Image (cartoon, rainbow, N blue to C red):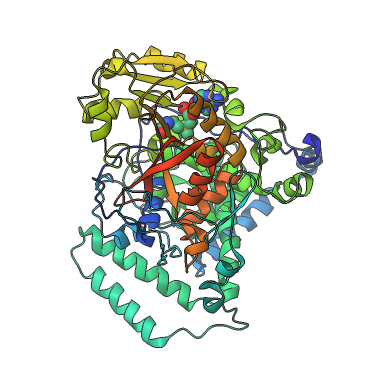
Amino acid sequence: MAAHLMSNYGTPALMNGHHSVTCSASADALEKPEVIQGVANTYLMNNTTNENELMRTFEPGPVPECMQIGIRVADNTRTQQANLHKDAVRLRKQPTAVSEVGMTCEAYEQRLGSTHVDTPSSEPRTPQATRTMASDMKDHHQGNGKEFNGILGPNTWESVGSATRTLKAASRSNGTSARTSYPSATPIPDQERLLDLTAEIAHNISQSPGDDSSRVKAVTAALELATALRPPGDIIMGWFANMSVISAVRLFMHWGAFSIIPPGKGESIPYAELAERINADEGLLVRVAAMLTSSHVLLHLPTSPTRPAPSLTHTPTSLLLRPGQPMSAMFSLMYNNVAAVSTILPSYFDAYGRTEPRGRGHIPTSCLAGCPEEDFFSLLKRDENALRDFGLAMRMTSKRVPVTGVYDMSRVLRAAAGRETVWVDIGGGDGHTVKEFLTVYPGLKPEQCVVQDLEEVVTAARKQSDEALKGVKWVGMNFFEESPVTGALVYYLRHILRDYSDPVSVTILRNIACAMTDQDSRVLISEQLNPDMANIAEPLPLYAAFKDFSMLSIGGKERSLEQFAALADAAGLRVSGVYRHVVTAHAVVELALK
Ligand SMILES: C[S@@+](CC[C@H](N)C(=O)[O-])C[C@H]1O[C@@H](n2cnc3c(N)ncnc32)[C@H](O)[C@@H]1O
């Protein structure tokens, strides 16, 4: 099996885990479409990091033998290179299809009507044209944001196995069948809508240049306009362009080209010089760079009176792809876990059956790495650099998903007095979430808090000796085994269950349930809460769907309340409360002993 599925793409890794940005959960924190859409903001925030902190990019495996032969016989004459260069320059002058990477978080923000607090205004934003993911989901689970409202039941979902939800046949036709039609020819866009969108774009562009909200509105309308104007074939062609952009970015990262192009304003590098510095033929470099300039990742500068040779310069987008940038680390994670994994997904499901991964091992990522038995974190642990890169990428994503301000802590704080162990953060990493709880809620004492994680993670975290965490207990453990701390008031799981399949998640919850000694004790699952697919009329926004799909590679999934409730039930627990964030789709699902 391993040999069958193995492919050489380097150490896989996955995006996950975020924190920060708070906004009080109001009683009316709704699971509106906008709320789910807001989660998209989490991932593509353009944080930067210390430039000196070089990030290792994931190395591909050795060149397959057949390709090595190709390399030996290749005849890269200067003439060929010159022709390629000429072709590339000529092609660059022609209008090119704009890349259509479909991720505009900003559109979500706008729809949320939120003024985003975490993006520093100096941060560059990609100018890239993208496809809108905006769609209005109608989630019927608009509770009051606090109480679990008893929506579960045989009428709304079916249980398959311990915790799998399938759509009811009736629900499948809910909304989607009426909505979906497949045009056989170029659709004729609604003229009136197109003109409205055009006016909306013009209006928003005419607003003050510093007005982020208008900019986002203009982008949202422009995306809708572009989608409406494109014939279906063009949409598919756009995917091909995207694939090539991704390949070209990967090559430039691997060659170290993004860090060689000077980052200063007005600075550039001639193609010939860059080719020499990365030890590549200029003809090859020109072709790869053409993909990046066509998609506005880099900027091509032609020869001019002050510039003796055609050159390349950075854009705000390419600056984020330099080594050490969190977005660059995130690119590697996504490349390894979405792009690279996609090459084995068909054979993976042929080999294992067309079913969700069920275990910790035998997941697409571990099969790709040639170690099918391993789980994602054990693969990550093998490679210190990969582990560090994972942390770097997580730092970026952690800015937009709230830690505090979602769950109502008043009951915990009341019950905390006199209790030895109040807060156990399971898989708490370096303790950053405990730190935030301690800062925001002084009633919580460090001595009452425990951070649990894998032995090596705890050892590394202890070394950081963060003053704010003084007094906190650190416990190395394995959440697949009996919990080492019993009788705590709260067992906190932030971004843990999403990494695992239903049966594996049930094991984690069951181990916690065994450690809960009284009825006051609670499990808090702090994660994205998806709407129940059986009850929404529109598809998930593209970003939310993509997040869940990318978790498939490591055997994890994003879940709805119904799915969490099914997990809880299988573990001897029940949902006792749901606390939704007002801006994002993040929530805290509270569980108690049955
Ligand atoms: C996605 S991170 C979440 C970290 C943190 N809770 C947060 O929200 O930022 C998952 C965490 O689970 C830890 N972990 C993975 N497998 C574990 C295991 N078997 N036992 C304990 N911790 C584990 C990882 O080391 C990592 O810190």
Q: Is residue 264 above or below residue 92?
A: above
Residue ID at (26%, 47%): 25
Is residue 522 at all visible to an observer of this figure?
A: yes
Q: Nearer the viewer, residue 219 or 494?
A: 494
Q: Is residue 300 above or below residue 386?
A: below
Q: Nearer the viewer, residue 480 or 321?
A: 480
Point 57% across, 25% down: residue: 480
Q: Position of residue 40 (x, y in %)?
A: 41, 52
Residue 411 image position (x, y, % from top left): 26, 33
Side (left or right) of 517 relative to 571: left
Quadrant containing the N terminus in the rendered view: top right
In this view, the residue in front, 342 or 530, is 530
Task: Residue at 32% x, 37% y: name it.
Answer: 403
Up the image or down, 153 lies above or below 9; here it is below
Position of 236 with respect to 210 (left or right) is right
Look at the picture and state if 138 lies above or below 164.
Answer: below
- Please identify the quarter of the rendering in which residue 278 is found: top right
Rendering coords of residue 219 (x, y %): 35, 65
Observer-nearest of 574 and 86? 574
Residue 115's x, y, as percent? 23, 54
How many discs mark residues in the rendered view? 0
Can residue 105 be seen in this snapshot? no
